[in-house]
Amino acid sequence: MRKYLFLALVLIVQNTFSQDLTCKDFKNGEFLILPNAYDLNTLRVTRQNGKQIETNESGNDLLVNIKYVDDCNYFLSYDPETEGFDDVSEMINKAGGLRISMTKIVGDTLYYKSVFKNDTINYVRNGRMVKLR
């Protein structure tokens, strides 16, 4: 009986002091975008004041602009002055950017859906981003 009481007490204390993250918590800070079936690379992301720097595993940076629709939805567009800007980045920008919708948060991990759509392409990808700080 004491074991169950102790276990219940531990669970209550843990849940009382745990912090539930919200979409707002993913607006600024450091994150990892995890590999998935579409992209096997991990990206390190630093966000601050509507800007995002994506660093790939080779150490190359790409500057991204964030335009928030609300706390959980935003558009990403790429800075054409960045060294990593390419034809795909240009195509995304011409279409108005990537639309990102945050779908759920589990612990420190944000699940999202990114959509790219233009006259000929409708590309949807699901991803995960882990909050580091």
Image: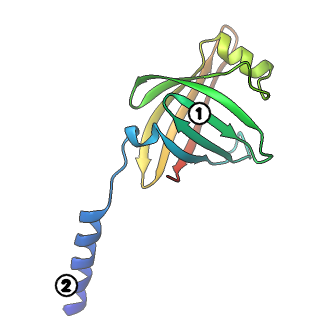
Q: Residue at x 80, y 46 (%)?
A: 58
Residue that protrudes farthest toward the bottom in the picture: 2
Of the residues shown, which amino acid type is indicated by label 2?
Leu
Which secondary structure lies at badge 2?
A: helix
Scheme of image coloration: rainbow
User: How many numbered circles does the render carry?
Assistant: 2
Mark on residue 5?
2
Q: Residue at x 33, y 56 (%)?
A: 19
Mark on residue 52?
1
- 111 horizontally vs 82: left or right: left
Q: Which of 123 and 29 is in front in this view?
A: 29
Q: Which residue is drawn at 27% across and 77% down?
A: 10
Q: Which residue is drawn at 33% across and 52% down?
A: 20
Residues at circles 1 and 2 in contact by the CB criterion of under 8 Å: no
- 42 horizontally vs 7: left or right: right
Residue 84 rendering spot, x and y as whole percentages? 78, 29
State the separation of the CA atoms marked 1 and 2.
Answer: 47 Å
Quadrant position of the N terminus in the picture: bottom left
